[in-house]
Amino acid sequence: MSRGILGLDVGSYAVKAVELRQTLRDLEVVQLREVRLGGSGGTLAERLAELVRTHQLPTGNVVCALPGDRVSSRAIEFPFRDKRKIAQALPFEVESQVPFDLEDIVIDWAEIASDRTRTELIATLSPRKEVALLLNALRQANMEPRVVEAEGLALGNLGALFELPGRRIVLDIGHRKSTLCLMLDGRPVAARSFPVAGRALTEALVKDLRVETEEAERVKHEEGVFAERLAASVPTALATLDRLAREVVRSVGALEPQLGGKASEHLDGITLVGGTARLHRLDEYLTERTGIPTGPLELPPGPAAASLVAGGDPLVFGPAAALALRGSTRAVTHMNFRKHELAYKVDFRQVGRELRWTVVLAVLAVVLLGASAITSLQMKSQRANELEARVAALYSEAFPSQPVPANPARAMGNEIREARQRAEVLGVYRGNLSALDLLAELSGRVPEEIDVVFEELGIDGKTIRIRGHTKSFESVDRLRAVLAKAPLFTRIQTSELQADDRRGGNTFSMTISLAEGDGGE
């Protein structure tokens, strides 16, 4: 059983879509798709509908996000841990910090750290109208997203597929804006956005090179701004990159309280995603300007890497992949602006249509299970009848003079128990030998010339214990040698040989083990 998940990154320049397939054991990258916006290509709804139709994208489990500049986030601490109390107190705590009425905003939160006496959390909020506008735009394309995340924090879900260890900034440099997410050991704890990104760089190149936008885009993607031939002719573009670097430094500096010190000393690195992250030598430039090691998002280990490379550039589709991962069981974030009247409503008719074949298969499985059970019972009944017939035949052989009872197995069990009881009463040992038989066998084996007197004799299971008296130790050795020749006896041990001062002579003890099976010469 698998389900499709569609991560939808709705930008100002293009819409990127990543389809994942979630199974019980694994997560598979199915396809990465993109559609450009603007121009004469139609409305957002029309372009989305075309994207879904052309590539047969799943729409039953869609995850999207509000742009980072439409979301506000702040760290808040409460002196208690109870989640119900937090949910009740959070709106009033936020109300005092924002210029909106509570009825006009949607609030969600995630725990960052806690102990017995406090909870540290990150709260995100957005105007309800912004959530409603996004939902209406997607509904026009026949999409009903189940989750509307916060764009910046949602980048933290990349850690479920890509290697993002330690304390790290994930920086998404898009078309209209750049958004960064601070991750501490795989958990997103803060996010910020600023309006310097790919479009500003393209506009700077248009001004510097006096070319059309399409040519500026080509130069940006194919040559960058650090090429030798452009070094002296793109001052505006270089100034734009300088603004980008300063905004990164300022935003990262604002996160130093969460880092516990200077960012350049406490951050392990900056990971770049987004279309502008492909700019030639941008990672080197940001490393030099920020003092923090910077590099592009690297391919994940395992088969997912091949799927990503085959589908498109992971840098471009990174934010969409993060949203798709939010809809999977590997999700790191769990915020959702679909609350109250904006909450996702399940279409039971659609669910019924989706589950129709599942129900049919389930009914078929129940029918097959019932048929299998009936067949199994019939086979067991037949085998039981065969076993009863065999037991009856055995009873007739064992007791030919008696009629076969209704339950021969129980009757044979009763006969065996009665035989054992009689054996215990009679003292039956080693097959059919009684205690008297053993005593006679033992006495008959002792030669008359051996002067031995048995004073005590006991039979316990398969062991005979003797205490006796003799005039010499030699007689004990001869007795042991004589008895050892009898097949009925196996191991013979003598002990406690000592002089008898009162009567004269010697006393001894002897232990004789009985052989298995019928004995006797």
Image (cartoon, helix red, strand yellow):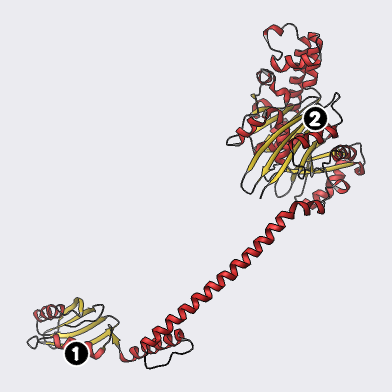
Position of 170 compared to 98: left or right?
left
Badge 1 crowding class, 10 Å Cα cut-off, few under 14, some 14 to 19, many 20 or more, is: few
Q: Give how far apart the Cα atoms at labels 1 and 2 are.
A: 107 Å
Name the side, left or right, on which 473 lies relative to 208: left
Front-most of residues 413 and 403: 403
Q: Of the residues shown, which amino acid type is indicated by label 2?
A: Gly
User: Picture quarter containing residue 19?
Assistant: top right
Q: Is residue 165 visible?
A: no
Kindly identify the amino acid type of the residue bearing the numbered disc 1.
Answer: Ala
Quarter of the rendering containing residue 217: top right
Q: Please, is residue 193 above or below residue 373 in the view?
A: above
Q: Which residue is mark 2?
A: 11
Helix or strand or loop: what does disc 1 sit on? helix
Mark 2, Cα crowd under 10 Å, few <14 / some 14-19 / many 20+, is: some
User: For numbered disc 2, what is the local secondary structure?
Assistant: loop
Question: Looking at the image, which residue is at 20% across and 76% down?
Answer: 490
Look at the image and tell me whether residue 18 can be seen: yes
Q: Is residue 444 left or right of residue 20?
A: left
Question: Relative to residue 103, is residue 54 depicted above or below?
Answer: above
Q: How many marks?
A: 2
* Residue 11 drawn above or below residue 135: above
Instruction: Residue at 67% x, 30% y: name it.
Output: 314
State which quarter of the image contains the C terminus: bottom left
Q: Read off the residue under disc 1.
A: 440
Disc 1 to disc 2: CB gap under 8 Å: no
Horizontal and vertical percent position of residue 373: 59, 69
Query: x, y (%) of residue 120?
Result: 74, 43
Residue 22 drawn at (x, y percent): 67, 45
The quarter of the displayed image where residue 455 is located = bottom left
Disc 1 vs disc 2: which is toward the camera? 2
